[in-house]
Image (cartoon, rainbow, N blue to C red):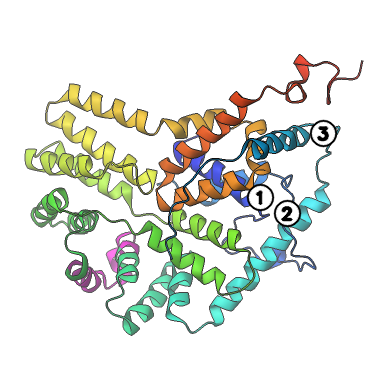
Amino acid sequence: MTLRHAFLAGLAVLLIFIGYRFWREPPEAQRAPSSSTEPASTKAVIAPIEKAIEETIEEPVAAEPRVGSVASEDTIATALEDSCLELNPALNPPLSKEESKRLETDMTTRMTAARKQLRASTMREHLHARAMMTNDSAERLKMLSQVLHDDPNNLLALWHAVHACAKLSRDFGCPFQEWEQRLIQLDGQNSRLWLLVASNQYNAGETTDALESMKRAATSAESRHYIKESMNMYQEAYASTGLFSSTEEVMLGVTFGMDWHPAYRQYETMCFEQSEVDVEWAQACGDYGARNTTTHGPVASSKSANAIHVNALRNLGESEKAHAVQKAFSELIKPLDDFSSNYSDDRRAVLLANPEMLERAMSYIRDEGELAGYHYLFAELDKVYTRSNRPECNPEQAPDGPGAPTP
């Protein structure tokens, strides 16, 4: 499991907790009606949804972070007891296929109804959200063009539009230069914007201009990726439908916000190719990578920046420093490796049984970034296990306890 899929596997827990299977546009045949909107049981089928998310998502109003003490001893004890029941089929049998299907259908039905409401809405914000939810490039550009026609200086729409254009062929007719220039006027001190500009110029064969833009990327004073703003847009769009709980709305914002990402591969290809043959490129790319490998925002963004930095150092003949930088970054993202390798059924059950822990982890992911969310989540799960060694959770240590094999 890759680091990106580790995040998706963790996010799948949040989806299961509220009974939501992540489909962008399910076929009409799968849109069955549902007579109930009750939240899903925490025992809804997990593996198929994790698999669906892995196969669906490509690899590469902001709330204050929740602070305060961690879950109380009673809450942790209850969570562990619940998790033991979750893990013991004899005491808590799994859902039937029919019940699992009903829960999935319920959320799919609500998602379909929400999309219909958003399609019928005349609000510019809803049109923008719909544009970023569709997989149809032509439809996305049509909707973004309408948003920018009505609000030419909409910074978030410009950011999405220029990135959307960057992923398309020049023959597609995308007015990226007009949008790009407007974006530069509004956000010209953003390091990540100048990386995008450099990549667009490089793909157009304008290597000299691309180098100048890359130098701007390496020296610009600010660095913004607009992930929280994107999450807020999705959250508010779904909240406007009145079909979801507040927890579901936050989860939908996080899910869709993390799904969309820039063309990191294009950035890496540009810097890898040019750093190998030009010292100026290697220096500019290395400086950009060093400035933008952070603990905030998407891990995919930091992974890309780190790869650019390490490659540049090697091309500059600084192999030892490159090794040290890579080692430090590996330690930085270790929580994701830990989560992936230790994301066992019992940890999953504890998490599902403790909504406070779930909600706080989701808040950290949104407000502080993926790494902060996983630092918190893994530490809390460890506390559950270090504070308790209950025999009912270790049947092999207590042959006569709940769930023990029948002689």
Is residue 134 visible to the viewer in this orientation of the structure? Answer: no
Work out whether 259 lies above or below 388. below
Q: CA distance from mark 3 to mark 1?
A: 19 Å
Residue at coordinates 30% horizontally, 25% vertically from top-left? 327
Q: Please name whichever residue, 377 or 345, is drawn nearer the observer in this view of the structure.
A: 377
Is disc 2 placed on a helix, strand or loop? Answer: loop
Instruction: Tell me if label 2 and label 1 are in contact, CB under 8 Å.
Output: yes
Q: Please name whichever residue, 189 or 393, is drawn nearer the observer in this view of the structure.
A: 393
Within the magenta stretch, is there residue 172?
yes
Q: Which residue is mark 3?
A: 89
Name the spot of residue 322 as percent of width and height, x first: 21, 27
Q: What is the three-letter code of the residue carrying label 2?
A: Ala
Work out whether 11 lies above or below 142. above
Work out whether 97 lies above or below 245. above
Q: Earlier in the sequence, mark 3 or mark 1?
A: 1
Name the spot of residue 349 as percent of width and height, x first: 68, 37
Name the spot of residue 102 as percent of width and height, x first: 78, 57
Q: Which mark is residue 40?
A: 2
Q: Which residues are magenta?
A: 163-184
Majority secondary structure of the magenta segment? Answer: helix
Q: Which mark is residue 17?
A: 1
Work out whether 245 lies above or below 240. above
Within the magenta stretch, is there residue 191?
no
